[in-house]
Amino acid sequence: MSESILTAPAGEQRRAIPPEQRIKEAVIRLAGNSQDGIQAIGGFLARLAGRSEQEVMTFMTIPSTISGGPSIFQVRLGSGEVLSAGDEADMLVAFYQHSYDQHLNSLRKGGVVLYDSDHVEANPEWQQDYRHVGVAISSLTVEAIGGTAKDKGKNVFVLGLLAKIFDLNLPRLEQLIRERFGGKSDSVVNSALSSFHAGYAFSIGDLMETFAFADSQKRTRPQVVMNGNEALAYGLIAAGVRFGAGYPITPWSDIMELLRRELPKYGGSFIQCEDEIASVAMALGASYGGRVAVTGSSGPGISLKAEAIGWGVMAEVPLVIIDVQRGGPSTGLPTNVEQSDLNIACFGGHGDSPRVVLAPASVEDCFYTAIESVNLARKYSVPVILLTDQAIATRIEAFEEPDFAAVCQDISPDLSPIPDAKPYDLSEALGVPKHAAPGTRVLSGKYPIVTGLEHDELGHPSASPRLHSQMTAKRRRKLQALARSLPRPTVYGPPEGHVLLVGWGSTQGPIREAVDRARAAGDSVSALHIRYLNPLPNGLEEIFSGFHQILVVELNDEGLYGYGQLAAMLRARYCDARIQGVNKCDGLTFKVKEILAVLQNKLAASKANPKI
Amino acid sequence: MSAIVVDPPTETLSTAPPDSLAERKGLTKKEIAADHPTWCPGCGDFSVLALYFKLIEKRKLWHEQITTVAGIGCSSRFPYFVQAHGVHFIHGRALSFASGVSLSRPDLHVFVFGGDGDAFSIGGNHFTHTARKNIKLTYVVMDNWVYGLTKKQTSPTSPKGFKSKTDLWGAIDQPINPMKQAISAGATFVARTTHTNPNHVLQMMEAAMDHDGFGFIECLSECVEFYPGAFDPSNPRKGGVFNLVPKEHDVTDEIAAYRLANEPFPGYFGVFYQQQRPTKNRLEAKVNEDARQRVPGLADWQILKQSFDRMK
Ligand SMILES: Cc1ncc(C[n+]2csc(CCOP(=O)(O)OP(=O)(O)O)c2C)c(N)n1
Ligand code: SF4
Ligand SMILES: [Mg+2]
């Protein structure tokens, strides 16, 4: 029997768990204050899961918090594919009264609330619906560590409790604790281990039953654990990006901070600029220098970059622009999620300015979409906007380690002399320009100008009516060529049925989970996830033709005319009245049950009148 | 010229330089000139262009060693007239773009040309930060005290009382003093010249190019269309005086430089301020060297793997 990392090794440490207590998954919500190291517990659990040889995944939401304020962290551990953060928690760990009061409603009926009895007074009215387990977390931690440590190791004490409750792998957790505190003094590591052991040794079994995760399939490749911003930034590095520029804004800042720290190791640089306009301009300068660069921001900063992105479209200079979406407009909801920048990404420029827009669907996908963005920018010499969002940026997932040697690419420019330079050659079949980076010697002696004025084939200004029409068409044609080459997305579920749920970006998980649940209940529902948003892949109408209703699920408002941003685009493109929207903009990710609720209404309508 | 020009580019013939580098002679004016400039006859910008050609000839710069970058304005059309790699970017952001080129392509010398509105109004913030970061490039602002391309609006350097289309009764706002602006922003090379003194322009361009850092020149360049005679008091041929920066002026003395800049028009011409301070290009290279030492001999994919190993 192979050793499982998530669960305790066989032998004396492994308790005999009755089969009914073997669980497939658990959603645990931790609620406290940000200084309590709540997120550290989540990190430990995620890493533990990531190191497991089993098909175990974690899925977390970290609502950004101002330091010192209330903080929560939700972990979903499962021995199987975990699609979303989980609507309801199976267990709530409440450190304070406010944590208890505010988060009890996130617990499913019959779920366990494990509370710090030093701080929380249980509400008798709630005791019927929820299992209450009080542990004097604070005083037991102080007792375990002793001295003046106060209750600083509470989080690790709780980790010990959880390790016991869920029969987690003790030696691996100890190792993770050592790694995490290893940089600090011995006494720090020892205190952490003491409180962890105290939690583990606590006789929780007297208060509640304990569980263990069912064994699941073995993994072939090792897992890595990170959030979407990290995956995206490392994807850019793998893609060969060696220059970036940006200005801080939540939730994009992590990406620039990571690139600032990491790029020098690869001989690259990330520059913090005075504002977003300078950032996009500087990145365009580096791209013009011959190697596609990156800039990024969140809503307000994307607005500022609009003019320069238009220059990139006109001058046909490649660039990758990351937009980590948050609630807008204006400063909006800086630390909440929304998918409301699709319009600005696709259409946010004056003039006819076609550009490429992509959205990753998961943390792992952030890594690969970043690489793809770079390659599309290069291949079509065009700005590419990568739309992620606050939810995917901050949530942590475990995924298979990439094949490093295979994904890392060298994209340094070729500066060897060329006979002739004609960047905007109209006879190019696909309409893709050929730029000669500065430093390239042009033997004809005629050098190209890269410009935002409408231009002739050499880049010299021209307002000839014929040229403007031809050049505008050329900039459009190359993206039509891209559309033809895009893979048609595959339907999740059967290709025919009553309802097709269409989504994009970070909502893939809850949408798929909604499909799974609806199908399990006997409903005829499938899903389609669109990764390439501009241009859209060809052939979607054929997919749509298999369904009575097409519901576009997005985290944005239904707009003046009743359709969300993707729904409106799809309706404009396909003139298909079956396309309707499922929208919300409360700043939170979709819960599976929210999607299911709308679905039930639509299904009822569809069954009543199948011709709709 | 005033608005966007629509005539087709003039073809300029040039002979391809011989292939072997050793055999290559310096470029001739014919090989450096591209489209015929679209400026109004008599515009001061012509001399700046002519002297840029001179600089390239004299210093034996090759096409592939330089890039000419500009924003938007009459003066910013500059790159079209130069037969070399060039960029016509957007209004006010040329310096940021050029910084991206300079920082990512240390093998190139980046020259930036533009107007006073481009530099000090819409691009004011970028001017400040490019100066303080001491990014290696040469920046010539062709200051005509007016918006030329958009036909005579008040510019940030228009003196009080200048009657423009947006200040019919005469400009009322305090103008920017480019010298003071540059010095206080932390520019490491700050010089002033005027298009009517070609030798001096060339001298300043050479000094700016040789300066290891952000080399800034304010070059008075008359807009004969919308602000004729603006600089006559600095032109001896028009009865004015051209005063060189006094010999005893210490260019490393920031306060003295500031005092020079405070002189009423026509003031002084020459290098006001110069300081040796590491460029951002160098500082970033140092950051990279240090970082590389922590990953000796590793291929890129191995460095990435190392990072991912820590996230297991
Ligand atoms: C974002 C933006 N705003 C305004 C303009 C219009 N515009 C073009 S050039 C210019 C001012 C030019 O003045 P200056 O920089 O002094 O150059 P000059 O023409 O005098 O050489 C303006 C306002 C523009 N092109 N882009
Ligand atoms: S700056 Fe004045 S003189 Fe020169 S081209 Fe423009 S409008 Fe004509
Ligand atoms: Mg001007």
Image: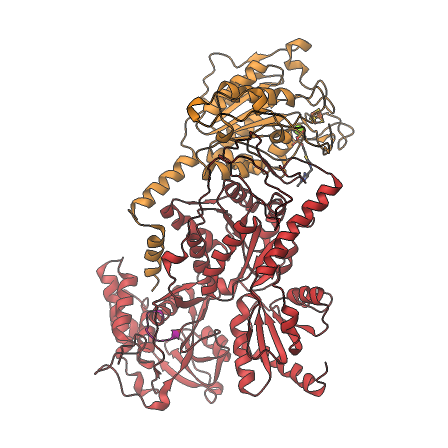
Chain colours: A red, B orange
Image quadrant where residue B241 sits: top right
Residue B258 horizontal/vertical position (percent): 52, 23
- What is the x, y in percent for residue A581? 66, 72
User: Magenta residues?
Assistant: A50-56
User: Camera-side residue: A423 or A358?
Assistant: A423
- Foreground pick, A248 / A605: A605
Quarter containing the C terminus of chain B: bottom left
Q: Residue furthest right?
A: B168
Query: Residue A539 appears at what percent x and percent y?
Result: 63, 67
B230 to A544, vertically: above or below: above
Q: Is A54 one of the magenta-colored residues?
A: yes
In the image, residue B81 above or below residue A159: above
The image quadrant where one finds ligand 2 is top right
A80 vs A418: above or below: below
Where is residue B281, by image quadrant? Answer: top left
Q: Residue at x 36, y 78 (%)?
A: A217
